[in-house]
Each structure stands twice: as structure tokens, then as C-alpha cells.
Image (tube, helix red, strand yellow):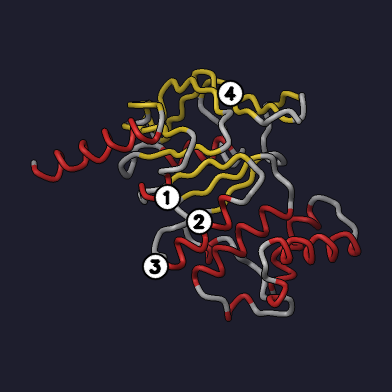
Amino acid sequence: MIEPKLVLNKISYKTFGRVILENLTLTLDEKSIGIIGKNGSGKSTLAKILCGLIHPSSGELEVHTNGNTKSYPRLDVGIVFQNPDHQIIFGTVEDEIGFGLKNLGYSKSDIKDKIAVTLQKFNKASWIGSSTATLSHGQRQLLCIMSIFAMDPKIIILDEVFSGLDLPTTKALENYIKELPQMIIQITHDLSTLKKSDRIIWLDDGKVFLDGSPKSVLIEYSQHAQRNMKL
């Protein structure tokens, strides 16, 4: 199996005269990557570029999957956002998971099968027939992850999915995520969820400030945050 890879070549993004990302050149091919940085550092903008929701102002993005190279990632890269209420649009669990599959052209019978397999994978077969309105915040976040997982992307981006969750829910969601077969790119302020990542990228003002192992980057980032708090 050829592992997926994202290659960024001098990616920049500007809006209303403001530079959000500047000249990013990166190769992302690890199984688990964390992206950290202060608010406004460009993390979410980068996530949207990586999944094809927006296009860079300059530079090129290459998506390498199954031996093929593309510049349009929409079918290969899925994203889960911070607030599940901004992503869930249907009233039942089945309709929510099935929506993306329908857009991909799956038949009704295949959609039904994929929904069942997905719910079984996450040990949530009991959710069949459930209203999305009855799910807790953490359960709704898990539903968003399941909906993306069902579409079989090669890469999944998680943009602040742990925000607002209590510790038990965070740990439960972490356990589901670590079992996913896809490459995971996680954007978060919760550094504790990144300790087992293969690589951490620290963005600051739209540029890569530090890039390396969790042990080296997270320690430096924590020390940097503590120094700034004392100012």
C-alpha cells in the first residue's frame, strides 16, 4: 500500500490585504501530525487549503494517493470542524452519514451497508434510528468523524474537535481517533492529545516556527507560552 502524502510548495494565502500564510513548503507524510500555534497563526486556513475548501493565493498543493498525484484534494481529504452543529445538517444518524455517500454516487443499498459497517466499526450500532438532536456534544462530534470516515478519505483533518469537551469525552474520542487507518492531521490547543503524534508543526504568523517530534516541539511551545503569560 502506498501511503498518502501532501506536498506544499511555497503556499501563501492573503485576504483583504492581510497575509494569513506565507511561503509554506512542507511534505506531510506521517501517520499522525499535529499543528499548533496561537489564535490567528493560520492553522484553520491551512486546514481549509489542505482539504480543498479554499485555494491558496500562490503556490501549489500536491495530493499523492494510490500512486497518483493531484492538485484537487476534495475526495481524498476529509475535515471535521470544531463545532458539530455547523457540520450536522440532517435529523437522523443514518441520513447524516449517508449524505456524503450519496454525493459520491453510492447506490441506496450500498449506502445502507456502509452506514451499518461504519456504526459497527465505532461500536455505535445502537444509534440506528437515533435523532441527531438527542446526541450529546461529544456524540455529535463523533458522528461528524464517522460521516467523514464512511467516505473513505485517505487523510482526515481534525480542526479543534476536542474544544469544549470534558476530559472523559476527550479521552473516549481520542481512543476512536487513534484506531482510524487514515493519516490524521490534528489542529488543537489541547497539547495533551498530541503527545503520541509522529510530528508536530508549530505555526506562528503564517509561517513554520518549529517542526519536529512531539518531545522537542511541545516542550518548546509550552515554555514559550509560559514566558508570554509572564509578560
Between the C-alphas of marks 1 and 2, the distance is 7 Å
Q: Tell me, yes or no, whether the two marked residues, 1 and 2, touch with CB atoms within 8 Å.
A: yes
Which numbered disc, 3 or 4, marks the residue that appears first in the sequence? 4
User: In which quadrant of the rendered image does the C terminus lie?
Assistant: top left
Name the spot of residue 108 as percent of width and height, x first.
Answer: 89, 63
Amino acid at dot 1: Thr
Question: Observer-nearest residue: 42 or 121?
Answer: 121
Cα–Cα gap, marks 3 and 1: 13 Å
Q: Which mark is residue 7?
A: 4
| Number of numbered discs overlaid on the protein picture | 4
Circle 4: residue type: Val
Examine the rendered structure and indicate whether residue 202 appears above or below residue 69.
below
Discs 4/1, front:
1
**Residue 13 to residue 155: above or below:** above
**Mark in front: 2 vs 4:** 2
Which amino acid type corresponds to the residue marked 3 in the rendered image? Asp
Looking at the rendered structure, the secondary structure element under dot 4 is: strand
Q: Considering only order in the chain, which callout, 2 or 1, is on the residue closer to the N terminus?
A: 2
Which residue is at a point 25% across and 41% down the rendered structure image? 222
- Image position, residue 73 (x, y; %): 67, 35
Q: Closer to the camera: disc 3 or disc 4?
A: 3
Check disc 3 and report its element: helix, strand or loop.
loop
Query: Would residue 145 appear left or right of 1 to someone viewing this image?
Result: left
